[in-house]
Image (spheres, grey):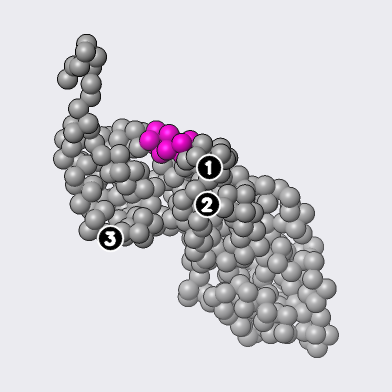
Amino acid sequence: MHINGRSIVDSRRLPSPDDLLILLTVARLGRFNAVAESLGTTHTTISRRILALDKQLGGRTLERSPHGWELTQLGAAAVDAAEAIESTLGSLSGLIRQDQSALAGLVRVATTDAVGAVFVTPSLVRLQQQNPQLNIEMLSATRKVSQNRSGVDLEIVVGRADVSTAQTIFLSNYYLRLYASQDYAARHGMPETLDDVGQHAFVSYVESALQVAELGPRWSSQLPMPRTSFQATSVFAQVEAVRRGAGIGLLPNFMVADREDFVPVLAGDFERQLPIWAVARPESLRSARVQAVIAALKEELKERAGLLAG
């Protein structure tokens, strides 16, 4: 269409910016249900909007895979356009608020219990205080990295990060070490060798429910089978059980190393180093909110490196 010699784009033939932004959210979260929760709508509405976008673009933007919805070549091109729209709207919003640095919207982070409580939470609180328009949902569970990463923008995991359809970012290392309470050591004595640990009660994760094998005592042959055990799915319950004299525990150093009521056991003979990773879809990693979360967490870990080294 031309008016007064100028070419005018017929907006009726352009894809809906709202639908493009919905596609971008699907690319980041992987599931319609998660997108619906994030945007405050329904699964049916998300599906309908994606179908409408496909019709306007003349092809499919998404295809189903074992890892959730993945972008087609057409979908990847549409997401590039959606990211440009998101960036432009973010700049405009910043001008309206006279705050170019502020982040807004929702970011969903899945994390392990211990790392989440000690490091992720303070970093997210500080980030939100700097960006009052930012909403945060943090899901805590100690599990191995998910192959579909459905419903979250970012996962913080420990141990091996074997994924094929996501990107991993190394954040730091920490250590699992053996600890007992002062009272337990006084009543039962301390083992002199690793073999002696088998004569003591032991506190650990519930083996049948443990997804991260490196967190369990049986992951290596160094630790013998204990005389008795107290097992819990929560690391906080394990720490409390050790504190109350239930036995020797294999605990994260950053949770107990600076506490006088915990005694290191065989400190020079045993420790297990575990990495902490950030894992996300490529589309999520290009989000300013996700980038800000990773930067905030890196800053938190750097500031407290001494606690991690323990």
Q: Are marks 3 and 2 in contact (CB under 8 Å)?
A: no
Going by the numbered disc 3, the residue's amino acid type is Thr
Of callouts 3 and 2, the N-terminal one: 3
As drawn, 100 above or below 150: above
Q: Circle 2 is placed at which residue position?
A: 133
Q: Position of residue 22 (x, y in %)?
A: 32, 47
Pointer 1 residue? 97
Q: Secondary structure at mark 2?
A: loop
Residue located 57% across and 52% down the image = 132
Specify few, some or many for label 2: CA neighbours under 10 Å numbering under 14, 14-19, or 20 or more.
few
Q: Does residue 11 show up?
A: yes
Q: Which residue is mark 3?
A: 42
Question: As displayed, is residue 95 above or below residue 7?
Answer: below
Label 1, secondary structure: give it. helix
Q: Is most of the magenta stretch helix, strand or loop? A: helix
Q: CA distance from mark 1 to mark 3?
A: 30 Å
